[in-house]
């Protein structure tokens, strides 16, 4: 999971954005549902012995129900994430999935590149902490792209006005670089790294 593959038919670069996220969401769902069921069953059957009487049991039941809700929300998010992938090919950049699919053609872009944000924790508070590198595909549209799910605005220097997050997966960043080099032609502005003062999650 989480590695890039190439379509033999079109030599497209495909980045499986959903695979790793779905796995983590399923683990989270299992943990939330398991603990939630234990707390809820214990509270409703009287097996849960707590000080505070009925009020404490009601609070415990509420916590159990909340954990179950979180678990089912994780399951739903995992369902939505199955099959989500980013495709870079001769026609442009596309997002494929159960919903929010889109395609940006090359002629809709003035330029495209890869941005890598380097973050290091403050040495004064975390002298042994590890840093992180967050990758993005950065876009300089030729016109209005409209609202596209997962395409964010701002937070990048000119000429970049939109970007697609690749995350901290180095394989995905390398795959994006390779795909853009192959298919974007003169629009590809290369990869650039810059230091940031705060950690970025997108």
Image (cartoon, helix red, strand yellow):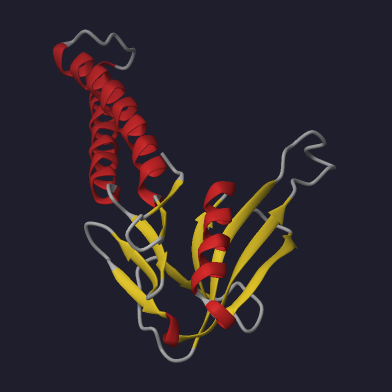
Q: Position of residue 22 (x, y in %)?
A: 34, 41
What residue is shown at x 50% (from left), y 64% (from top)?
179
Question: Furthest-bottom residue in view?
Answer: 143
Q: Position of residue 157 (x, y in %)?
A: 66, 78
Q: How many marks?
A: 0
Quadrant in which residue 106 is drawn: bottom left
Q: Is residue 120 visible?
A: yes
Question: Furthest-front residue in view?
Answer: 9
Near-viewer residue (150 or 142): 142
Q: Position of residue 114 (x, y in %)?
A: 60, 66
Near-viewer residue (192 or 34): 192
Near-viewer residue (49 or 17): 17
In this picture, is 147 found above or below 31? below
In this picture, is 15 found above or below 90? above
What residue is shown at x 35% (from left), y 55% (from top)?
8
Left/right of residue 53 with respect to residue 95 in the rendered view: left
What residue is shown at x 30% (from left), y 27% (from top)?
30
Q: Is residue 201 visible?
A: no
Left/right of residue 123 with respect to residue 34 in the rendered view: right
Left/right of residue 143 with respect to residue 36 in the rendered view: right
Q: Quadrant of the N terminus?
A: top left
What residue is shown at x 34% (from left), y 12% (from top)?
51
In this picture, is 63 found above or below 123? above
């Amino acid at each position: 999971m989480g590695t890039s593959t190439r379509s033999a038919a079109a030599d497209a670069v495909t980045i499986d954005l959903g695979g790793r996220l779905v796995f983590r969401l399923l683990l989270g769902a299992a943990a939330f549902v398991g603990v939630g069921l234990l707390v809820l069953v214990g509270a409703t059957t009287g097996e849960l012995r707590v000080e505070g009487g009925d009020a404490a049991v009601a609070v415990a039941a509420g916590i159990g129900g909340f954990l179950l809700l979180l678990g089912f929300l994780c399951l739903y998010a995992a369902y939505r994430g199955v099959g989500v992938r980013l495709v870079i090919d001769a026609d442009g950049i596309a997002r494929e999935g159960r919903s929010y699919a889109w395609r940006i053609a090359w002629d809709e872009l003035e330029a495209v590149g890869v941005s890598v944000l380097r973050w290091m924790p403050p040495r004064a508070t975390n002298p042994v902490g590890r840093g992180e590198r967050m990758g993005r595909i950065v876009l300089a549209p030729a016109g209005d792209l409209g609202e596209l799910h997962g395409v964010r605005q701002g937070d990048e220097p000119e000429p970049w006005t939109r970007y697609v997050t690749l995350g901290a997966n180095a394989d995905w960043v390398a795959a994006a670089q390779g795909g853009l080099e192959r298919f974007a032609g003169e629009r590809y502005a290369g990869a650039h790294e810059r230091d940031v003062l705060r950690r970025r999650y997108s």
